[in-house]
Image (cartoon, helix red, strand yellow):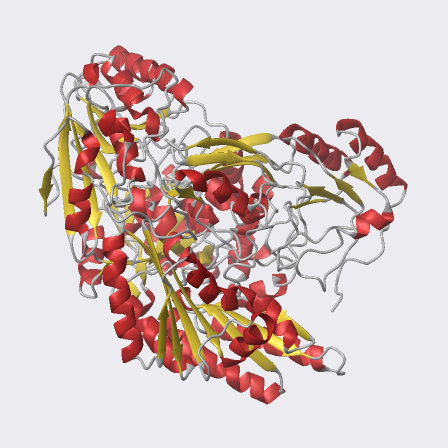
């Protein structure tokens, strides 16, 4: 599981020369070439892909990033942007032959503008820091990826991060009003939601660092809801829980979040954080409702009724923040918690239409049994986003390969059901090879047109998202064939 | 050019299987009459048409209901108008998933009718009757509820397009949560047919609200609006706030918690009122403005959706301070969601955007020009449509555009010409400065190097 671009730095004289050039445009201490320090950047949250960066830079301004990118252009070396390195798809995996641009020194909240319900921040500001800056005034920043305490807004922009509450509130792309970016040519450009023309802002968000580097982000702030109600419902089986989810959505309620965990995930969470979920549950459902108190009161009564009707054997409603935190504790700890019941695991991220959940979960069960690999299921049930945790023992010969196979088959299931190979973790290096399962060559070539418009030399985070992309000068052969009418003999050459 | 090959071109176009006819005056695209009209019945026929256009170097402009065909700039050339009216199938309504997949020629009305059967809707209030899904996306049209649900780009989850060379490409899919690959849907939203032809789209849906309440208040004219400071930015219009946060305790029981403007001396302006409404925990879905004439007062109306909509509409009544009384109704005001122009060729329609707290200044900038403008639109998002009378002269129009731009630029605002007769339009830059224009041109060059897709319709070089 080390299919990376090489584990040892291959820095030769060229990179040394580049490092000196970089040092000339950056503050003292902002260029790292020491092998030991470089190694601390060798991976992001997906730790089995590793590559020691050729050079690391720690710029403080957009102008410095632009200067770095221009130097990379001059020498034709690739560059990769990195925030906190919490990504789970290897999107920030460095290049041994390139420059890693780390935004950790750009963490100022530049402006909080409550009358316009927005804030302007640097890319290295953490997701949670935005909410903390405005919470005293009754506002918050809605997208809440589970790593929100440490992940940066620049990384959120690159990955179009979601979170448990995106069922109701959407993703990063729905909450970013403007971006300042450094293009892969080294120009500083503002992409604004109010600009007429192509929605380049929308295209940039979620492009995983392949269209340039974010240097400033204007985010939308939301007024904190008047009321938040969190319910925990315990069911005998996943099927019953799934039925409750369908009935809630079918009843016209859009909760802020609907999360589900299966028995194995609950077992792990109990072992790790003693979350004290109802004993004997085959599945627990967490439903969070927010909004005007008059609405949430009506909705929570309806959700309780629906859960009981679907077979819930226990219901708990959080009466205060402490109780709410207790309900969420097990869910939030779930990924790390499986470490208590398994020596190693793969976190998968796939999406299916919500109504396909029961069938897909049954198929995952079968896969699990066939391969002798346990799978714990934790998912954002409201939007069909599965996070199967594929458990294995890395000491056991062949187990990792079997786990990898199960994990890959789960993505096949997602695609077969009209879903997606990633709902929030991104494609990165990890899933580039799965893109052809979801998209045709024409689809990928068309996406590549966007890439070439922004980055004709392919220097911005190359090797991510797309499997073996074409060079920008390369013309796809299929599009230059004879005219179909001529070919079919129905017309002469005009 | 295809001119010498007229009949051969028609034969080739017919060979695609699409219905082909000669164009008439009714097919005019911003003043340019195409030569032929094609009405394909499938994505494959659209692709075949584009391949013929590529081989004969014919320029094509897509159209849906034609409701905004007079918007935008005249195309540099236009041989073929590609109408999507036969692409009128709703392909899949997965009501349990709150998702619909539809062909591009489905009208907003037909879609709404089909979704209503399941108690669902596409929460996009499209301003003109007969608008199609494809046209709404291509023109990035949106309406009042942008405040709560966003615009077309926020609700679009998948798209199928045909490029200038006939390539059929898809991105996104039919699940709401999906980050695989670039989002071509975003790129095509607002593209005015310059990158390709949209043939299918998938959207996320919302349940139709069981109750809707509009609460409406009249404010006096701009001379009496109070602006708390000279910075163009209001003091935060929110008063004391309890320890409320997303993970904090539930807020105070009363909705529309204490809000500043009620305490300010004198009548508040629309911006302060909209700010207070947008910040209210009663959570309106939309806050709209209608201003019939710059000499007179403005009407502000807010929409509340949900089982408790009535109580929430009542709860914000204090926000207009001395103004009022508010009127609460189960029906929208007559002007709600309509653009202020007459919607026909010859109309002069502009879009004014400013940071919401600067809306008063933007409205004053309009009033200061002394033309009988009509302004309507989303006040809380400060995306406003401005209509000028059809008889407005060229110099007056140019002075209006440059004068308003000068006033709103320091606020971070912009004024865009959406529609104007060609003799007026050529007097001004329809967009004003856009920093990302060079990048947009590079995207255009990659997607349509032969400049056959609605060339020049969106901006110079696009």
Residue at point 30%, 42% (across, down): B147
User: Is residue B9 shown to the viewer in this render?
Assistant: no
User: At 43% across and 63% down in the image, what residue appears?
Assistant: A323
Judge whether A248 appears above or below B263 on screen. Answer: below
From the viewer's perspective, is residue A265 above or below residue A82?
below
Q: Nearer the viewer, residue A225 or B374?
A: A225
B213 over B267 or under it: above or below: below
Answer above or below: position of B87 versus B410.
Answer: below
Residue A396: image quadrant is bottom right
Q: Position of residue B232 (x, y in %)?
A: 37, 20
Q: Would you say A29 lies left or right of A229 here?
A: right
Foreground of the two, A121 or A25: A121
Residue A49 position within the rendered picture, expressed as x and y whole percent measured from the top left: 72, 61
Q: Is residue B230 left or right of residue A160?
A: left
Q: How many marks?
A: 0
Between A319 and A485, the one lying in front of the other is A319
Percent position (x, y) of residue A288?
Answer: 37, 62
Residue that appears at 29% across and 41% down:
B141
Indicate the position of residue B38 as horizontal and vertical percent values.
Answer: 29, 49
Q: Is residue B105 visible?
A: yes
Q: Farthest right residue?
A: A13
Quadrant for the N terminus of chain A, please. Answer: bottom right
Question: On the rendered structure, is A291 left or right of A434?
Answer: left
- The residue lying at 57 percent from left, 88 percent from top is A369
* Closer to the camera in the image, B36 or A243: A243
Taking A169 as reference, is A472 left or right?
right
């Amino acid at each position: 599981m080390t299919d990376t671009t090489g584990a040892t730095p291959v820095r030769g004289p060229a990179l040394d020369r580049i490092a000196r050039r970089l040092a000339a445009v950056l503050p003292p201490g902002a260029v790292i070439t020491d092998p030991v320090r470089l190694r601390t950047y060798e991976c992001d949250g997906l730790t089995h892909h590793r590559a020691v960066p050729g050079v690391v830079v720690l710029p403080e301004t957009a102008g410095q990033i632009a200067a770095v990118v221009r130097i990379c252009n001059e020498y034709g070396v690739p560059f990769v942007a990195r925030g906190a390195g919490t990504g789970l798809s290897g999107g920030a995996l460095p290049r041994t032959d390139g420059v890693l641009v780390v935004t950790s020194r750009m963490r100022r909240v530049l402006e909080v503008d409550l009358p316009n319900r927005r804030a302007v921040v640097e890319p290295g500001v953490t997701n949670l820091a935005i909410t903390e800056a405005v919470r005293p005034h009754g506002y918050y920043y809605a997208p809440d990826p589970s790593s929100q305490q440490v992940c940066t807004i620049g990384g959120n922009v690159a990955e179009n991060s979601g979170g448990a509450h995106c069922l109701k509130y959407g993703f990063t792309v729905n909450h970013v009003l403007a971006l300042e970016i450094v293009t892969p040519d080294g120009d500083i450009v503002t992409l604004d939601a109010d600009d007429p023309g192509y929605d380049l802002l929308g295209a940039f968000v979620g492009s995983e660092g392949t269209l340039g580097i974010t240097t400033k982000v204007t985010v939308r702030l939301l007024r904190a809801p008047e009321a938040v109600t969190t319910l925990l419902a315990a069911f005998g089986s996943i099927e019953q829980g799934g039925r409750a989810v369908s009935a809630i959505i079918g009843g016209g309620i859009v909760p802020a979040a609907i999360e589900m965990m299966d028995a194995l995930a609950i077992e792990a969470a109990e072992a790790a954080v003693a979350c004290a979920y109802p004993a004997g549950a085959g599945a627990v459902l967490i439903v969070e409702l927010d909004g005007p108190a008059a609405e949430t009161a009506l909705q929570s009564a309806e959700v309780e009724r629906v859960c009981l009707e679907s077979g819930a054997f226990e219901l708990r409603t959080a009466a205060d923040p402490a109780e709410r935190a207790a309900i969420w504790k097990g869910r939030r700890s779930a990924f790390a918690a499986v470490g208590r019941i398994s020596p190693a695991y793969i976190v998968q991220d796939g999406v299916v239409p919500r109504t396909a959940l029961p069938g897909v979960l049954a198929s995952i069960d079968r896969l699990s049994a066939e391969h002798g690999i346990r799978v714990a299921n934790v998912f954002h049930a409201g939007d069909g986003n599965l996070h199967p945790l594929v458990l294995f023992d890395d000491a056991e010969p062949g187990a990792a390969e079997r786990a990898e196979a199960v994990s890959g088959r789960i993505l096949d299931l997602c695609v077969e059901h009209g879903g997606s190979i990633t709902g929030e973790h991104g494609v990165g290096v990890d899933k580039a090879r799965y893109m052809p399962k979801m998209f045709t060559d024409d689809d990928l070539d068309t996406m590549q047109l966007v890439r070439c418009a922004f980055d004709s030399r392919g220097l911005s985070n190359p090797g991510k998202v797309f499997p073996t992309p074409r060079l920008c000068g390369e013309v796809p052969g299929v599009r230059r064939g004879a005219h179909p009418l001529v070919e079919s003999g129905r017309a002469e050459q005009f | 050019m295809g001119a010498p090959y007229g009949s051969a071109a028609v034969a080739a176009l017919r060979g695609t299987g699409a219905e082909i006819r000669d164009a008439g005056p009714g097919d005019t695209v911003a003043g340019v009459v195409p030569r032929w009209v094609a009405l394909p019945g499938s994505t494959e026929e659209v692709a075949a048409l584009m391949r013929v256009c590529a081989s004969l170097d014919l320029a094509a402009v897509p159209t849906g209901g034609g409701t905004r065909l007079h918007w935008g700039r005249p195309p540099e050339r236009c041989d073929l108008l590609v109408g999507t009216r036969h692409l009128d199938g709703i392909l899949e309504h997965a009501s349990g998933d709150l998702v619909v997949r539809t062909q591009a020629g489905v009208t907003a009305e037909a879609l709404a009718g089909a979704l209503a059967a399941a108690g669902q809707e596409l929460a996009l209030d499209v301003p003109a009757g007969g608008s199609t899904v494809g046209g709404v996306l291509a023109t990035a049209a949106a309406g009042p509820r942008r405040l709560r649900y966003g615009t077309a780009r926020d609700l679009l989850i998948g798209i199928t397009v045909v490029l200038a060379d006939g390539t059929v490409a898809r991105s996104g899919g039919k699940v709401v949560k999906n980050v695989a690959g670039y989002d071509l849907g975003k790129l095509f939203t607002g593209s005015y047919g310059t990158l390709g032809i949209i043939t299918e789209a998938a959207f996320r849906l919302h349940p139709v609200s069981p109750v809707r309440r509009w609460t409406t208040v009249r404010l006096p004219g701009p001379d009496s609006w109070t602006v708390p400071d000279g910075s163009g930015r209001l003091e935060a219009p929110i008063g004391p706030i309890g320890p409320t946060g997303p993970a904090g305790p539930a807020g105070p029981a009363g909705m529309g918690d204490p809000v500043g403007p009620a305490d300010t001396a004198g009548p508040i302006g629309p911006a302060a009122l909209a700010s207070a409404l947008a910040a209210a925990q009663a959570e309106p879905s939309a806050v709209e403005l209608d201003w019939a004439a710059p000499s007179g007062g403005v009407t502000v109306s807010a929409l509340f959706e949900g089982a408790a909509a009535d109580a929430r509409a009542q709860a914000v009544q204090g926000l207009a301070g001395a103004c009022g009384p508010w009127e609460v109704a189960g029906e929208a005001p007559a002007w709600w969601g309509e653009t202020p122009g007459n919607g026909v060729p010859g109309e002069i329609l502009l879009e004014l955007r400013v940071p919401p707290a600067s809306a008063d200044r933007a409205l004053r900038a309009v009033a200061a020009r002394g033309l009988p403008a009509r302004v309507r639109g989303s006040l809380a998002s400060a995306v406003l449509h401005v209509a000028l009378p059809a008889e407005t002269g060229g110099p007056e129009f140019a002075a209006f555009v440059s004068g308003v731009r000068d006033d709103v630029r320091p606020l971070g605002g912009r004024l865009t010409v959406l529609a104007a007769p060609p003799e007026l339009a050529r007097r001004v830059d329809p967009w004003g400065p856009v920093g990302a224009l060079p990048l947009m041109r590079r995207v255009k060059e990659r997607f349509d190097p032969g400049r056959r897709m609605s060339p020049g319709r969106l901006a110079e070089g696009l």
